[in-house]
Amino acid sequence: MSRVKRGTNANKRRKSVLFQAKGYKFGRSTKEKLATEAIKHALRNAFRDRRAKKRNFRTLWNVRLNAGLRSLGTTYSKFINMLKKQDIELNRKVLSELAADRPDAFKRIVDEVVAKAK
């Protein structure tokens, strides 16, 4: 009877786990049990932080927008309220980029929105 070698699936799983843990410090990159645990934590944190990143960016846009608006004599909440009342659908990301990179264009938008509100 010929010899049967086993363990191909186990070796494949072990290789995969250690490949994912490449670059981790200490035993987490070489020991299967520690690597598995580290990968589970890393994947959980990555999932959570992909969602947190969206919140963080929206907060950043609001802060930038408010800073730009205060220099022009209004506030974030008043400006957003005016935009909604006038059915202008410029999102916060675009407005904050304009405030940071193209202040002249941003000033024209703000002046027009404020003028229509009066």
Image: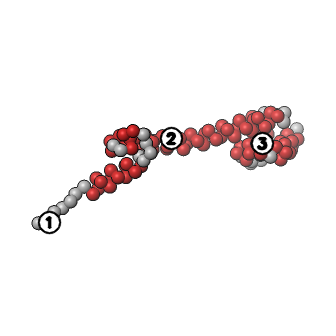
Residue 89 position, x and y percent, is 74, 48
Q: Quadrant of residue 31?
A: top left
Between the C-alphas of marks 3 and 2, the distance is 30 Å
Sequence order check: which comes first, mark 2 or mark 1? Answer: 1
Hey, what amino acid is under mark 2? Arg
The dot on residue 99 is 3
Sequence order check: which comes first, mark 3 or mark 2? Answer: 2
Between the C-alphas of marks 1 and 3, the distance is 75 Å
Question: Foreground mark, 2 or 1?
Answer: 1
The dot on residue 48 is 2
Between the C-alphas of marks 2 and 1, the distance is 51 Å
Q: Are marks 3 and 2 in contact (CB under 8 Å)?
A: no
Q: Residue at x 58, y 42 (%)?
A: 53
Residue 79 position, x and y percent, is 78, 38
Residue in front for this viewpoint, 50 or 7: 7
Q: Quadrant of the N terminus?
A: bottom left
Residue in front for this viewpoint, 3 or 54: 3
Sequence order check: which comes first, mark 1 or mark 3? Answer: 1
* Within-10-Å neighbours for mark 2: few <14, some 14–19, many 20+: few
Q: Residue at x 21, y 59 (%)?
A: 5
Q: Quadrant of residue 32?
A: top left
Question: Foreground mark, 1 or 3?
Answer: 1
Q: Farthest residue toward the bottom?
A: 1
Hey, what amino acid is under mark 3? Ala
Hey, what amino acid is under mark 1? Ser
Q: Farthest residue toward the front?
A: 26
Q: Farthest residue toward the left?
A: 1
* Within-10-Å neighbours for mark 1: few <14, some 14–19, many 20+: few
Residue in front for this viewpoint, 46 or 75: 46
Residue that label 1 marks: 2
